[in-house]
Image (cartoon, rainbow, N blue to C red):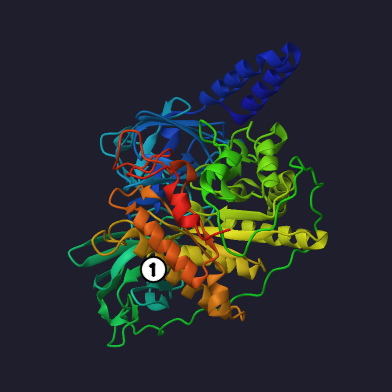
Amino acid sequence: MPIHSHIRSFRSLRVLEHVLGSSMRTTLAALMAASMMTAIAWSDVSVDFRTASTWWGGYSGRVVITNHGPSAINGWTLTWEDGPAIDSSWNVAIAPTGGTHEAADVGWNAHIPAGGHVEFGFTASGSLEANVRSCSLNGIEAAVTCDGVPISGDSSSEPGAGGDSSSPTSGQPDDDEGEPSGGEAGTDNATGSNLSWSIRPDAVWDSGFTATITITNDSTSVVSGWAIQWSDGPSIASLWNGVMTASDGLTSVSDAGWNGEIAPGASVTIGFSGQGSFDASSFHDVSLEPGVIVVPPSGGGTGSASGGGGAGPTEPTEPTEPFEPTDPIDPPPSSAFVTTPAPEWPDRFFAPYVDVTLWPPPHLPTLMNSTGARFFTAAFVVAMQGQSCEGSWGGYSPYTPDQGFLVDQLDDLRAQGGDIMLSFGGAAGTELAAACATAEDLAMAYQSIIDAYQLTHIDFDIEGAWVAHPSSIEHRSLAIRLLQDWARDAGRTLHVWYTLPVLPQGLTWDGLNVLESALEWGVELDGVNIMAMDYGDNAAPPAAASMGDYAILAAQGVHSQLGELYASFGEPRSVQDLWNMVGVTPMIGQNDVSSEVFTIDDAELLRAFASEHGVAMLSMWSITRDHACPGGPSPWASASCSGIDQESFEFAWRLGADRP
């Protein structure tokens, strides 16, 4: 059906809706969707499940839906069976039921123009497998690929899958919008290309390091898809900005999809953390696709796919000056629902996480009286229903201040000298930083929540795919800068903490990028709280140390990283000032990684270390887990119990014993 016929159909349906009233809207919406479905043939739609980045035990992925048909698609629902076990997602409303998944647009991305595409992201455990079955868009079967490769036995393997001759046969998006072509990993489509590489350490400590590999396109043509391979080298604990495979001493890293295209003269970087000491000369038989195997000189560190010597180690770039908003922006009108003012917080405190959306709902004043904890980190505020630039607890509509959620509890808690630090983000739901169109809109959304609860302490829990999501990182940094400017102008107190994932060696490169962005925008951080949990056996071998030991190692690593970071911005800080910026949050009891168990002895060890060094914050995930499970110890993590033998609230008493 030609596009002008769709327009007439929509106009007619809209007129009919106006005549019949709102009671017909649901039916009319279905009719409108059906009118569009007639334009979709099986060969018009392709879907590619892609790996975006990997870490030990999991990965982030992208699902790209491409419209190869002659007409636009307005409104879409994608269904499939099996495939990845999705933990969290963004830019989509997704509802897994058993082995079937249903993913729908979130309004702003409902329109797929002819020849265009949309995409959404997710995180999952394990690795992406080519086991997606029965995939359809709006009820029409779609051609399916997995990282660009047609899935065997599915409709995508039949002749003609992926659209007409003007569209990629693998079902990948066109390159009109700068999207990588998604060809075979490691294939260089440039003519006469010359890829060079260099490696440098970024941070080095007693037991490990982080390093960056830079790949540069020295040719005059665009490179689409790349891979680098080497033998020997370090023991890699975590890698980002690429997809890694390792076997029999050989390590291969290919692009992560979004960074597969390298313009002439441009570069991409891969970051990784390793154990032991950094030694560039340990990288042997390095090859870049397409290229000749090159061996770094005795000093190590550089190479070229065409056999050249490279340009030497790349010096770290100087931090940019903080950006300034172009025009003054006024905060939104204040609307307070909590009337009791917040108390003063001590310099060092215990603030365990509490998931306030659990059922039965936790009661903060009761938890305070049961545990002795005065302060809590309340989790998590995300985008309303996964798409709106409006914050709500867990993304649920009734869980907002104007609906009275937590208002009475917080008034009661403050009357007894307690308080909350509200946490934005978390592993599930859609970050407000991604849902809001601009940084100014994001700051308004944050400020409305701050005003409603009269907050003096806020936390930004940045994990999963969001820790490597450039646009949301930038939006968040500027928005927080605006919040602090508004608070300063109003004579109010606003303390800002970041909570970031960590390895025993310290923050990942992505986490450091998040902090660099904050400092570039002029954000004043009170501290960095590390999630000392779920490292994976490769990063934290169970036989080598306890979870308490690994938490302490991670804290020491972050302390050093913060020192280097602030010094690089011309703001050197003393050893004690840096400890005053460190927070540690273990996952008590049984972690999500079955071999990781944080015990009561680990809590005692961490508390003693924090007292000795003046660590600013101790926390834990979470206060509602601080009980033994009814059925006894369990190898599986639960939201309501720790999975180990313990007294009720024993972790809270042990970790918070020396905290006001």
Answer with left or right where residue 309 lies relative to residue 177. Answer: left
- Residue pictured at 43% horizontal, 26% vertical: 140
Q: Which x, y percent locates residue 273?
A: 37, 68
Give above or below for 107 relative to 609. Answer: above
Residue sitting at x 63%, y 34%? 399
Q: Quadrant of residue 309?
A: bottom left
Position of residue 363 measured from the top left corner of the image (x, y, whole percent)? 57, 37
Residue 240 visible within the image: no
Residue drawn 51% across the image and 23% down it:
38
Front one among 538 and 223 = 538
Where residue 93 appears, x then y in whole percent? 52, 35
Q: Residues within 10 Å of mark 1 (few under 14, many from 20)?
A: many
Q: Is residue 414 visible?
A: yes
Residue 502: image quadrant is bottom left
Q: Residue 482 appears at what percent x and percent y?
A: 73, 59
Q: Which residue bears the numbered disc 1?
A: 553
Choose top left, top right, bottom left or bottom right for residue 565.
Answer: bottom right
Question: As drawn, which residue projects farthest toward the left?
Answer: 248
Residue type beneath disc 1: Leu
Find numbered disc 1 in the image and state the secondary structure of the residue it sits on.
helix
Q: Residue furthest top?
A: 20
Q: Please, which residue is most extreme toward the bottom here?
A: 298
Residue 372 vs residue 619, the one in the foreground: 372
